[in-house]
Amino acid sequence: MNMNKGIEEIIKNLGDIFGSKNFGDKIVLVTGGAGFLGSWICEVLVEQGANVICLDNLVSGLNSNISHLMDKDNFKFIQHDITQPIFFDERIDVVMHLASRASPFEFEKFPIQILKANTLGIWGGL
């Protein structure tokens, strides 16, 4: 499946889930936004007109996954480790927390980092 076809499919499925609602008027924080899945979510949200803040420390995410979004007015990238506090001047409407190493091969090598990303990373949202 090519990227554009995949993005269209995700947007269609979001419409099925949320009805006619989209994220066009929202500020959305995507942690882990430069990762494989996070970058697709960023792409979809940008296409829907959401103001996307992509947060990633680039340990497993890649700049190349989001490079095509960098010139978009409604996309902002912040390189940051989600286990460290971060504060925003703007209100955040939606947080999509994807900042965690997802490969089972990495669970054995990085158990503490994964635990911290999955706990401390979402702590501020509680």
Image (tube, rainbow, N blue to C red):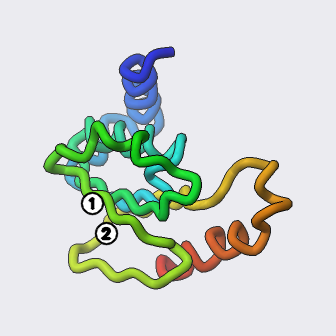
* Circle 2 SS class: loop
- Please identify the quarter of the rendering in which residue 101 is found: bottom right
Closer-to-camera residue (117/108):
108
- In the image, is residue 83 above or below residue 106? below
- In the image, is residue 120 above or below residue 114? below
- Nearer the N terminus, badge 2 or badge 1? 1
In percent of width and height, residue 60 lies at 58, 53
- Three-letter residue code for mark 1: Ile
Question: Residue at horizontal 37%, vertical 36%?
Answer: 19
In percent of width and height, residue 75 lies at 24, 51
- Please identify the quarter of the rendering in which residue 42 is found: top left
Return the residue found at the far right.
108
The residue carrying pointer 2 sits among few (fewer than 14), some (14 to 19) or many (20 or more) residues within 10 Å by Cα, namely some
The residue carrying pointer 1 sits among few (fewer than 14), some (14 to 19) or many (20 or more) residues within 10 Å by Cα, namely many
Contact, mark 2 vs mark 1 (Cβ under 8 Å): yes
Closer-to-camera residue (114/21):
114
Question: Residue at horizontal 65%, vertical 69%?
Answer: 118
Q: Provide the residue designation for mark 2.
A: 92
In percent of width and height, residue 53 lies at 31, 59
- Three-letter residue code for mark 2: Ile
Question: Residue at horizontal 49%, vertical 58%?
Answer: 58
Q: Provide the residue designation for mark 1.
A: 27
Question: Residue at horizontal 80%, vertical 49%?
Answer: 104
- In the image, is residue 67 above or below residue 29? above
Closer-to-camera residue (18/7):
7
| Left/right of residue 10 with respect to residue 99 in the rendered view | left
Give the Cα distance between marks 2 and 1: 5 Å
In percent of width and height, residue 89 lies at 22, 79
| Left/right of residue 110 with respect to residue 71 in the rendered view | right
* Circle 1 SS class: strand
